[in-house]
Image: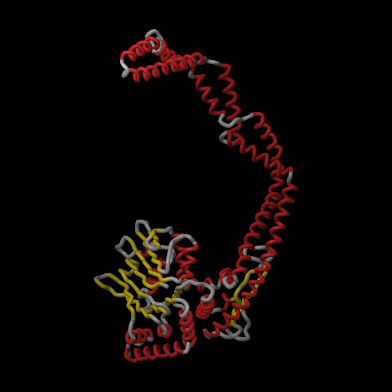
Amino acid sequence: MLKEITIKNFALIDEITVELTTGLNVLTGETGAGKSIVLDAIGLLCGKRASLNFIRKGEDKAKVEGYFIITDDLKNKINDLDLVDCDNELFLSREISVSGNNKCKINYKTVPHTIYQIIGKFLFDIHGQNQEQSLLLPEKQLTLLDGFLDNTQKVYLKKVKESYLKWEEAKNKIDKILNENEEKNEMVDYYIFAIDEINKAELEVAEEDKLREERNRIVNGEKLSKKGEQIYSRLWGAQGCVPSYEEVTFLLKEMSLLDDIITSVKDKSIEVLYNLEEVANDFRTYFDSLEYDEYTLNKIERRLEIINSLKRKYGNSIEAILERQTEMKLVIEQVENKDAYLQQYEKEKEEALRLYNQFSEKLSLGRRESAAKVEALIKENLENLGIYGDSFKVHFIDNEMPTEIGREKIEFYFSPNKGEGAQPLKKIASGGEVSRIMLAFKKVFVSLDNVPSMVFDEIDTGVGGESLLKVALSLYDISRERQVICVTHGPLIAAFADSHFRIRKDVIDERTKISVIPLEDKDARSEELGRMLGGTEHLNLAKDQGEEMILFAMEQKSVK
């Protein structure tokens, strides 16, 4: 659960720290007081996308920090991912900066946003009005239904997708051969000619560089010869150092006999002179090899022209030409062995389809079992929320072709009025009904996951009268198993709070600031409920009504 949250320089918030409790935490306040800003901060804390609009005007950065206490099960689940180290206490920090230097920290260590998001999803389930709209989408409905599958049945979800992808891959290969076969047939003659042309050239990797080096040497032979002759004469000529080699060596040996110190100098000098002799001989060999050979030059030019011609046709290097040749050979092989390839891919397709049918059938059975459970549970919870009639059905629609989600689609059907017949949820549900259906799902899902905190943003929108009481009771029931943070305009829901916070917006020193005020005694709560009841003119009467609501809620809690 979220034990404490600190929000700094976030939108209209200067700096606040809120200590939350287990059970039902309720946030109330005037319209526009900043309740949604607090929820945005919680969303940022659990990994949702950052926006520069979150940074308070005139500040460089905004920061949200949260301190969590988690169960052993959740601790083990997080540690099993081997992403971060955690115990039963967890500290999350999110900082967004005008400079773009945003930071995510878990237990005071910087982590990538992707890892931060993964951990955040383990800590919070946030329900906003956009999620109500997503409940109307059949694909979202299927995801919710699949959440009721047991672990064995969920394995079939993965196997269905894997076998479908193999089936699709084989099918695409077959389609490609059939669609491209005519075009490839037309290209075969050209490819045969091209392959033969490349073969005749007998290309060798890196030969082009060697040819260009040899050509450069021949073209510049005269210049190289003159400079080589000059170097050789300096080394070996009458005034050169090499002819003096024997004389110098003899003198050094005589000196070393007279003084041992000169021995090391002698050895180094002899080595230098020996190396100079080798250099001189190398230059002599190189110099003798230099000659202008027009025949060899023409031969090199013709070879380079062949290579350049092939490069213009088949690739910008010898490696590319040879690679293109391999590709053309493969095309010819595919055309010549088309039937064999088709037969191979057909077998792969049939085997993948066999597995797909096997796994999708088991998945379908699991989904239909889950649907029966879901219908019963949702119907029960909807009745507790004041929705009767033909209520709720899961409608199955068979897919004509294999899909990665299985052999069927589903859609939630709903009838708020008995005897009228169920229709797709998206066609007939009012805003208040969608809110209650979503709440029914959340209540059912509480037993299926271990997310410790659930956030509801105005779940009571469009709900009033006795139905509002039932929404309040459902929220209270959920909060017995999970921490619930709820933004509401409904005084009856606020009356059931274990912890009640009023969000207020004030102008101080020409700056708008949001504050979160814990309502810690019955008088403060009664006054806030009175305000929510609209008691501005008769405040004492409204406050008395608020107090009665709190007492009524306490009575309802006592029989739970």
Q: Is residue 460 visible?
A: no
**411 with respect to 178 (left or right):** left
Nearest the viewer among 11 and 559 is 559
| Residue 87 vs residue 213, the one in the foreground | 87
Visible in this render: residue 306?
yes
* Left or right for 209, reference 273: right
- The answer to whether 206 is drawn above or below residue 511 in the figure is above
Residue 302 image point, x, y percent: 59, 23
Q: In what quadrant of the picture does the N terminus appear?
A: bottom left
Whole-percent x and y of residue 117? 45, 63
Colouring of the image: secondary structure
Q: Quadrant of residue 274?
A: top left
Q: In screen coordinates, is 364 left or right of 221?
A: right
Residue 552 in the image: above or below residue 30: below
Q: Image height check: is 353 above or below 193? A: below
Residue in the foreground of this view, choosing between 214 and 559:
559
x, y percentage for residue 175?
69, 52
Residue at 38% x, 12% y: name it. 249
> Residue 506, located in which quarter of the rendered image?
bottom left
Q: Give the image quarter of residue 504.
A: bottom left
